[in-house]
Structure formats: C-alpha cells, structure tokens
Image: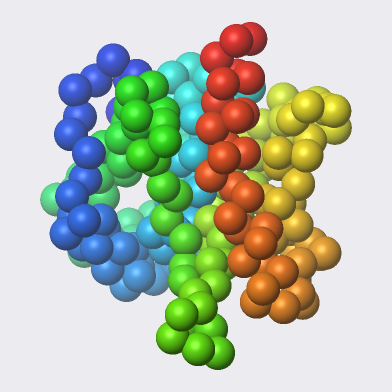
C-alpha cells in the first residue's frame, strides 16, 4: 500500500491536545503489540526529522506503517476501516510537521511528550522518557549506517547518549532509580534542539 510522503512545505495544522489524546487512544487499541503509544510516536517522529537521511526523501510506506506495527500478513489491516487508517496517517503527518515548525519558529517552546510520575511528596515529579527514547531509536533503526557517525561523534554522541541509555534494550538506565531516569530525560529537549541546529548547518 502506498502512503503520502512527508512534505516539509505542507500547511498541515498542529494537532490540538484533544486530537493528540484521540490519536493516543486510537493507537492503544490496535491489535499489534508493536503499535506505538503517543510518547513513542513523538520520539519516533523526532528521530525521523533529525535523521541524516532526510525524511522528505523517504517513501511514506517505509516509515508510516511502523507506527502501528507494520502492514504484515496474514492481517495487513489493523484498522477497523480505511477511514480510521486515513485519520491516523493524517494525524501522524500533522504531528511531524508541528515538530518541524516548532523547531524552525519557536524552538524554546517545543516540548517532547514524556511520561511523568509523582515522587515521594507532592512537590516532586519524575520524568521518564523511556517510551519516547524507544520510539527515537526505532527511527534510528531505519538508517543505522547514516546514524552511526552521529552516535560516535565527539559533538553529537553526548547529545544522543541519554536516549541510548533510556531506550536501548541493555541501556545503563534500564534498572536505574526514578531520579536517575528523570535526570537523563530532562537532558533530551535541549539535546534535540542542539542536534537540530547541527543538522541544519550540514
């Protein structure tokens, strides 16, 4: 099945909070265990935009179905209807465009979608970007050779380190405390903006 390609010049409107919640609910009821939640999707789209391989050059069918676990046999139709599939596809395209537009026009206002959990007292809240980081690394897996120099680079490697630590299967923070995971998670927003600036110069 063919899917639309990402067009950086599109006029897609950002998703509202209500639409993001609707998208998260749609993804949560899909039959595939590989379907992403909204946090993983946000990380995935961020990774696709930052990839050394330009997203606009990637056919839609190469990356969009990954969101719901792929169009696999024997049941390549994980949606209740073609209308539902189209709704998800358009929501994904709108969300990736909103990230790109935020970075271009209001980078300091951009916030990734992370989980938050209450700490031991009411004044403490822990961020946990594990799902987000897993989504980001899923994007990396689409172009591992292109990403390798970034993970190994003296400038870019440290910016990607929190993502590898949180999202990798054997990442060093897999069994870490909530405080340690929170500290790593909070490094990610500024790191992504720094990567975006580096990518735009290349």
Above or below, 46 against 27 in this view is above
Residue 25 location in percent, x, y? 27, 68
Residues 145 and 95: in front is 95
Residues 79 and 74: in front is 79
- Residue 10 seen in the figure: yes
Question: In this rendering, would 126 be left or right of 90?
Answer: right
Question: In this rendering, would 107 be left or right of 4?
Answer: right
Residue 128 location in percent, x, y? 56, 67
Residues 47 and 36: in front is 47
- Residue 35 seen in the figure: no
Q: Quadrant of residue 171?
A: bottom right
**Farthest top residue?**
202
Above or below, 157 against 69 in this view is above
Residue 89 location in percent, x, y? 28, 43
Above or below, 115 against 39 in this view is below
Instruction: Give the colour scheme of this rendering.
Output: rainbow
Q: Quadrant of residue 143?
A: top right
Above or below, 116 against 50 in this view is below
Residue 96 location in percent, x, y? 36, 36
**Farthest front residue?**
123
Question: In this rendering, would 186 be left or right of 25?
Answer: right
Q: Residue at x 67, y 67 (%)?
A: 181
Q: Quadrant of the N terminus?
A: top left
Number of numbered labels in the structure image: 0
Q: Residue at x 53, y 56 (%)?
A: 132
Q: Residue at x 65, y 76 (%)?
A: 178
Q: Quadrant of residue 160?
A: top right
Q: Residue at x 53, y 83 (%)?
A: 119
Q: Quadrant of the C terminus?
A: top right
């Amino acid at each position: 099945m063919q899917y639309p390609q990402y067009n950086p010049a599109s006029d897609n409107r950002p998703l509202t909070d209500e639409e993001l919640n609707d998208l998260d609910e749609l993804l949560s009821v899909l039959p595939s265990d590989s379907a992403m939640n909204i946090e993983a999707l946000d990380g995935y789209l961020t990774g696709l935009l930052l990839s050394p391989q330009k997203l606009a050059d990637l056919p839609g069918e190469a990356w969009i179905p990954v969101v719901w676990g792929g169009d696999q046999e024997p049941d390549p139709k994980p949606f209740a209807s073609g209308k539902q599939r189209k709704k998800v596809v358009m929501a994904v395209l709108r969300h990736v465009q909103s990230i790109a537009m935020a970075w271009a026009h209001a980078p300091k206002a951009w916030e990734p979608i992370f989980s938050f959990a209450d700490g031991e007292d009411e004044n403490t809240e822990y961020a946990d970007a594990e799902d987000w980081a897993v989504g980001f690394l899923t994007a990396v897996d689409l172009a591992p050779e292109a990403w390798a120099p970034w993970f190994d680079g003296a400038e870019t490697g440290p910016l990607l380190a929190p993502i590898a630590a949180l999202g990798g299967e054997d990442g060093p923070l897999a069994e870490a405390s909530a405080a340690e995971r929170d500290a790593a998670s909070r490094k990610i927003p500024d790191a992504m903006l720094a990567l975006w600036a580096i990518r735009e110069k290349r």
